[in-house]
Image: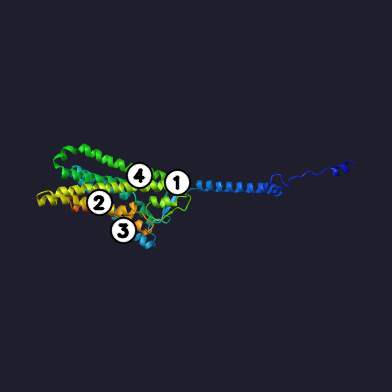
Amino acid sequence: MSLQAERRRPKQKTWPNQDNGMEKLRVLKDVSDINILNTNTRRLFRKNKWNRSSSESVREFILLGFPCSREIQVVLFMFFSIVYLLTLMGNGAIIGAVCWDQHLHTPMYILLGNFAFLEIWYVNSTVPNTLIIFLSETKAISFTGCFLQLYFFFSIGSTECFFLSAVAFDRYFAICHPLHYATVMTGQRWFNLAISCWVCGFLWYMVPVILISKLPFCGPNTIDHFVCDSGPLLTLSCAPAPMSKLISYTLSSLIILLSFFFILISYALVLLAVLRLPSASSWNKAFSTCGSHLSVMLLFYGTITVMHVSPGSSHSTLMPKIMTLFYAMVTPLFNPLIYSLRNKEMKNALWKALGKFEISLKVFGSRPRRSVE
């Protein structure tokens, strides 16, 4: 009887496998529940995939530099090394001349000494890593190293804009207001002006660098350049960053255009004042002093304006490299030549410094050597 009762008892519906969620889905009667569950599952999968990509962010970048054969890479390495050494020697000679010659301890030449020191920083922020890229197989730069290079490269460029403006203001005040120049432009004021140029230059581009460094970089990590520039980094970001791009472009354009127009106005006023001078010798002296500054200004602003003020999609991948190479390496190389060849006082100071250096070598070489018994 118990057997018959057991047979008459209705069977309860059981799950084939309690731990298997897919078996539960097969016996669900409501199709809408299945669709809702699948939708939630896909959303969860996408979220986990994004989190996994964000956690596995880029830790280094690949700088392609100048893609070419190994032989050409070695030739470029040797050429860039020579330019680098000449730049260090030329700007170092200007710094030495300003420090050793008492006649150059004036506000204008102190500013030129700061400017030469700035150029040494400028080439050191890009050229050593570029030389490593020429000989490296991986051509990699760390995430931190890339953004440090970006910060120093743009900060030194901004500082150079401030120093060129300061030199233009110095020439304006010296030529247009010569009677008040010595009393108003004291050494302490020029020291404060030089410090202000350094501080403002290194604070100007700090916010864009911080904003770009906070962007997610999930890959790819290849930069078709030989330096870490803001444009390629914004392109490599996984998320769109219109605000970071706008701030970067606005600050770059402001520092270039404002300083450029300030320099133009200063030298326009200088030109008007020179034309009022009665003698031709005064004309020649004024133009010889300002001519070197104008040459450096046109050389520097001509290239950075093309790169950072009027960027466009029509630029090829080679054009940004050439422009960056021009104002990052060629301009610091030519600046000592321009200042020394067009300025008689600087030329005489360099010859004196060279003579002292030769005398020091002769004295050092003529010392009797101790015999070792």
Q: Secondary structure at mark 3?
A: helix
Asked if disc 3 and disc 1 are in contact, CB closer than 8 Å, the reply is no
Q: Residue at x 19, y 53 (%)?
A: 341
Q: Nearer the viewer, residue 319 or 63?
A: 319
User: Looking at numbered disc 4 in the image, what kind of residue is underneath it?
Assistant: Tyr
Decide which of tag 2 and tag 1 comes sooner along the chain. 1
What's the CA distance linking mark 2 and mark 1? 35 Å
Position of residue 47 in the picture relative to residue 195 (left or right)? right
User: Looking at numbered disc 2 in the image, what kind of residue is underneath it?
Assistant: Met
Q: Secondary structure at mark 4?
A: loop
User: Looking at numbered disc 3 in the image, what kind of residue is underneath it?
Assistant: Phe
Decide which of tag 1 and tag 4 comes sooner along the chain. 4
Q: Which mark is residue 205?
A: 4
Which is closer to the viewer, label 4 or label 3? 4
Q: Nearer the viewer, residue 99 or 114?
A: 114
Tell me if residue 369 can be seen.
no
Residue topped by disc 2: 297
Residue topped by disc 1: 215
Residue topped by disc 3: 79
